[in-house]
Amino acid sequence: MAKTKTTFFCQNCGTQYSKWQGQCSSCKEWNTIAEELVQKAEKNDWKTPENAKKTKRSSKPLKISEIDTSHDARYNTNDAELNRVLGGGLVPGSLTLLGGEPGIGKSTLLLQISLRLPFKTLYVSGEESQKQIKMRAERITAKTDNCLVLTETKTQQIFRQVEAINPDILIIDSIQTLHSDYIESSPGSISQIRECTTELIKFAKETATPVILIGHITKDGHIAGPKILEHMVDTVLQFEGDRNHVYRILRSLKNRFGSTSELGIYEMLGNGLREVTNPSEILISKKEEALSGTAIAATIEGMRPLLIEIQALVSTAVYGTPQRSSTGYNVKRLNMILAVLEKRAGFRLGAKDVFLNITGGISVDDPAIDLAVVAAILSSNEDIPVPKEYCFAAEIGLAGEIRPVSKVEQRIQEAEKLGFSTIFVSKYNKISLKNTQIEIQLVAKIEDIAAYLFG
């Protein structure tokens, strides 16, 4: 019997120590170092000798000019939103980590995808029984025999089933529930998560099988376990949304095979998640009469143009210090825009409360929505509604100038497609569009937009 060995790990960053100490010298957090039991057995390969022929990739060194990438076509997931966020589909041999709050729909998303895939998929669950997964599958109403369900938490047992089934795609729900015989600490600990992920990486790279992991998150919104977990995998996806709302947003935080600026939007229904192909339908409110304090902005997420609604409320400050609050928009940038309006345009907003909201529950960092923020604030302040067929796409500078933004032609085309009659952009943008039905209004200063909208 091997000698029992204990070591100390930081529960925040995963740094290993030979003895306990109060503060982690790596991440500077206090009281995060805990003792874990580590007892390694002799490791065997994940595959048995008779199944060695299943290995599809060789570890022999090759010249970079000799490496063939033609056969590594991506797996189409039959989900346009997921394909967009991944950069075109699942890459053979890749590890994808999906994180999100409890109950947000991570398991539903991956089960729905596994039921739609034309490939043989092994769905391994350490949290639900096969009957529970069957009930969810019946609710999703997808008919397929390509999805196999396994309830298991020991990696050695999982790999035995993998050898017998030889799936094209492996899904693990979740990585925090797995444990390996090679480490004697409890499931979910730093050492177990690291060991199980290492075994899955070895399996994925040697067999060119895509592996998707579900990861729990902490109360701070970070994926539970050591930070090295995010470094080990190829792609990190974040599933966001409010459980009180029906819309979910899929973001890419890390992607070795594509862009990290793409966005996927879903609607949570009783029969699963519906792909939202036209996000503007959920981001723009339906109202019968014109209301003050709202303006439409044309923004870009990755390669996808979106039209979002900005809502502002300006009221007299009841208490001594005026409030500045925003949802989905940077508060510091809001304060900067209010200062520009006060200094350059002469609007007295210093003694008024200002509340800002981006509808749909999304957060936007694109500076091109600045002009719509200005229009919404001035509309609420003057109590004059902005015409609902107007939209805006420009950045505000500290001197009060209207600055140009990138991909302005895509924004204009999206606004025209959705029926807007006028779009306000910077006069310094170079626009080569022809035969457009939408009126392109060029503005240079904040005073121009205020005079045009409110006289």
Image: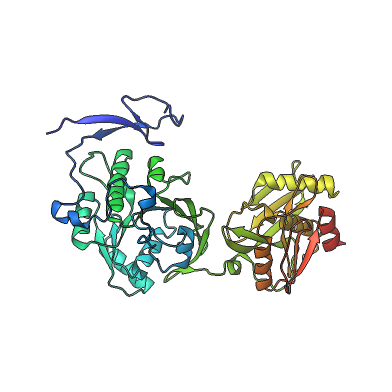
User: In this image, 100 relative to 392: left or right?
Assistant: left
Vertical relation: 187 (above or below) 7: below
Quadrant of image for the N terminus: top left
Residue 325 vs residue 18, the one in the foreground: 18
Residue 137 seen:
yes
Residue 398 vs residue 359, the one in the foreground: 398
Vertical relation: 373 (above or below) 185: below
Residue pictured at 31% horizontal, 48% vertical: 201
Residue pictured at 26% horizontal, 56% vertical: 56
Residue 215 seen:
no
Residue 359 vs residue 453, the one in the foreground: 453
User: In this image, 291 relative to 452: left or right?
Assistant: left
Residue 445 image position (x, y, % from top left): 82, 53
Residue located farthest toward the right when viewing the structure as drawn: 455
Residue pictured at 41% horizontal, 71% vertical: 271
Q: How is the image coloured?
A: rainbow
Query: In the rendered image, which quarter is residue 323 located in?
Result: top right
Residue 236 image position (x, y, % from top left): 43, 51
* Number of numbered tags placed on the structure image: 0
